[in-house]
Image (cartoon, grey):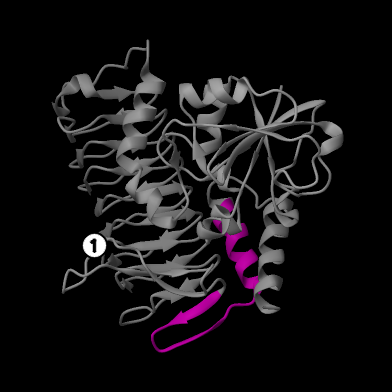
Amino acid sequence: MNYILFSDNARNQMLPFTFTRPLADIRLGIFTIRQRWEMYLGSKTSTLTQDYLSRRFPLVKGIDNTLINASILPDAKLIAAIQALLPNQTLVQNELLIAYRVGENDMEGDHVGSDGFENIEPVEYAETLSRVSHLMDIVNLINNSINHDYALITKGRTSMPIPEHVRVIAPENVFVEEGAKLEMAMINASEGPVYLGKKSHVMDGAILRGPLVLCDNSTIKLGAKIYGNTVIGPHCKVGGEVSDSLFFGYSNKGHDGFLGHSVIGEWCNIGADTNTSNLKNNYSAVRLWSYVENGFTNTRQTFCGTFMGDYAKCGINTMFNTGTVVGVGAQIFGAGYMKNYIPSFTFGGPSGYSTVDIEKVLATERLTHARRGLELSAEEEEILRSLYHQDQNG
């Protein structure tokens, strides 16, 4: 069976992160949505996505294909129901399309859904579903995702030993992968597990509280205070104070400053002493920018921080308002609170905003990648150019 992940209208609700990746590649815990599906299915997946993303995330068709809604998270019961589908059957729950099974000839273009297929038979799924359909879902699912992924990745395995110089509460809830380096740190895993990935590094004086994930090749800096419900994706450097937040990967928050109830994309840099507000002075629900509504919508959440798209950068002492969305490739700086919505490729700050030239964005990203011993790929550059032209042309 060939498995393909597709996005429904939840994709637009997950912007700016889905500007640069399919919904399936959103990180929730130790794993992305795709990685979790692949572990349950025991099979690789490809993606049915927007044309401008398809070169980096190509579609692979087979003779027999099962297409799965990437906004839905897998579990054993759902896997069994999907694998029991017969050709031309769809798995649905009310109006929500979960999965469908079709032949190669039924897959023309990038259309998703049952329209145009003949003899479609819907199969109703009655079990509870877990779904990612709004930006705040990433933050709200961090706790469950860490616990779920920790159990999945550590099952039947033994942790590397924790060095004696590390003070640990509830060491049975700490898993250290091979090559991880722990210096004079404190870890409290009494309220949730702590996972330290391969070649990760926890530096002196850092205080860690579970549930917490530090993915492969990432570093927690000297004296950092990392609260629970935090995921630090691969190849990140994080310092200061962090709570209830998630980093996708290859991003830096290397210095002091507070980050709370926030999501940071890939290849971002947060300047020294940057702070995010995640709670309003009057404790009211936070409004957050919606690309679907082209305006601010009520999250019905009291705690809501900053959502920063890929390749965005902010200067030292940046102050983010409660509930801020930053688009792709923005370069922001200056004294005073930033706007609650900063469009992609914005340059400047409270004293004035303009649009940064795409060539300057690409030049910065080539340097950023080179600092990691990598190159900005032609596929990444193509995506950034496409987004820039879409943005300039409305």
Mark 1, residues whose alpha carbon is within 10 Å: few (<14), some, or many (≥20)?
Answer: some
Q: At x 17% / y 68%, what residue is drawn?
A: 283
As drawn, is 350 to the left or to the right of 273? Answer: right
Q: Which residue is under mark 1?
A: 302
Q: In the figure, 137 relative to 343: above or below?
A: above
Q: How many marks?
A: 1
Residue at image location 31% in from the left, 62% down from the top: 305
x then y, percent, for residue 133: 47, 51
Q: Is residue 83 above or below residue 321?
A: above
- Residue type at numbered disc 1: Thr
| Residue drawn at 66 percent across, 62 percent down | 384
Q: Position of residue 23 (x, y in %)?
A: 57, 48
Bounds of the magenta span? Answer: 346-369
Q: Residue reaching furthest right?
A: 105
Image quadrant holding the C terminus, namely bottom right
Residue 391 picture location, percent across and down: 65, 74
The residue positioned farthest toward the bottom in the image shown: 351
Q: Nearer the viewer, residue 138 or 363?
A: 138
Q: In which quarter of the image is residue 199?
A: top left
Q: Does residue 54 appear anywhere in the picture? A: yes
Seen at 31% across and 73% down, the residue is 321
Which quarter of the picture shows residue 1? top right
Residue 178 visible at all: no
Q: What element carries label 1?
A: loop
Could you tell whether 197 is left or right of 58 in the image? Answer: left
Residue 205 percent across, percent down from the top left: 17, 42
Verify whether residue 276 appears in magenta. no
- Is 328 on the left-hand or right-hand side of 102? left
Note whether 156 is above or below 361 in the view shown. Answer: above
* 99 or 121, nearer to the observer: 121
